[in-house]
Image (cartoon, grey):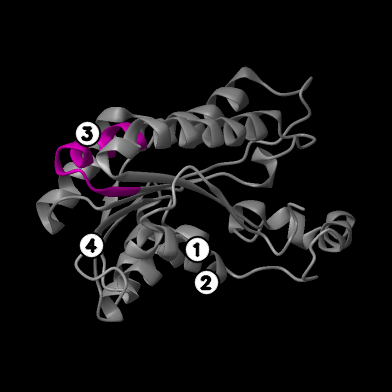
Amino acid sequence: MRLKNKNALVTGAAQGIGRSVCQRFAEEGAKVLVVDMNEEGGEETARLIRDAGGEALFHKADVSSLAEVEGALDASEAAHGPINVMVNNAGIVRAAMLHKMSEAQWDEVIAVHLKGTWTGIHAAAKRMIPRKEGRIINVTSGAGLRGTIGQINYSSAKMGIVGATQSAARELGRYNITVNCVSPAAITPMTETIRTDERFESKYLERICLGRWGEPEEMAAGFVFLASDEASYVTGIVLRIDGGLGM
């Protein structure tokens, strides 16, 4: 087991990639705290893990609040011991053309994605630094590597996450803490419109070298690698798991 006895916290884990990451972590021996605002989905993720013989608990928290993220980490460490792996995966979409986008739409996306990544890095790093060990994994997207129409808030946040990842990697490397970023394909319920709208699907698939949509389980494999001892000399990177879409 590649993550045996590791303590992992995953945000945005009520569905999609976050749920798959939690399940794979547990299969690899990690003890998992499932964090989300969606209580029903989060509890379901934890239950699925326990039913499969793994160890998991759910904790409701708003990642845009540092106090709530600190509380989630407190709960994780109380139940499972010192935190080893922090995955900042929570996200939302509030799409609109830039001239029609409201201030609230901008603020919500920046708060969850960009501030929510900072709160996770900040709170986890304080616990990892004294032990000089840790893995922090953030989540960007193709929109974080190039601009996207109707998503100026989302693209700005995701590009910011890449910068935050690289800055944190530089600061925390001296403490043996790696900080990396995963750029997954559009496979989650949050991006379902792209896959189900005929206007977008065919054009989008044409840009994917493998010519098919990815599966959450395929995304989760990359997270396991970055969380494991195998990635001990990997930091500051963006790992694209997108079938070649980002080329």
Residue displayed at 34% across by 74% down:
48
| Whole-percent x, y for residue 67 in the image | 25, 29
Q: CA distance from mark 2 to mark 1?
A: 9 Å
Under circle 1, the secondary element is: helix
Examine the structure image and report whether residue 125 is included in the region drawn in magenta: yes
- First in sequence, mark 3 or 2: give its number: 3
Q: Identity of the amino acid at label 4?
A: Lys
Label disc, if present, on residue 126 of the rendered structure = 3
Instruction: Specify the quadrant of the image occupied by residue 52.
Output: bottom left
Question: Which numbered dot is residue 217?
Answer: 2
**Marks 4,2: beta carbons within 8 A:** no
| Circle 2/circle 1 CB separation < 8 Å | no
Q: Which residues are magenta?
A: 121-135
Q: Earlier in the sequence, mark 3 or mark 4?
A: 4
Q: Which mark is residue 6?
A: 4
- Please tell me whether mark 3 or mark 2 is closer to you in this view: 3
Q: Residues within 10 Å of mark 1 (few under 14, many from 20)?
A: some
Which amino acid does the dot numbered 1 rest on? Gly
Mark-to-mark CA distance, 1 and 4: 17 Å
Q: Residues within 10 Å of mark 2 (few under 14, many from 20)?
A: some
Mark number, residue 40: none
Q: Disc 4 and disc 2: Cα gap in Å? A: 20 Å
Can residue 142 be seen in the rendering of this structure? yes
Query: 79 or 170, which is in the foreground?
Result: 170
First-in-chain label (2 vs 1): 2
Is 30 situated left or right of 106 in this image? Answer: left
At 33% from the left and 76% from the top, the residue drawn is 27
Contact check, label 3 and label 4, Cβ < 8 Å: no
> Which amino acid, by three-letter code, is at mark 2?
Glu
Measure the C-alpha gap from mark 3 to mark 4. 18 Å
Query: Residue drawn at (67%, 56%), measured in percent from left and top?
Result: 186
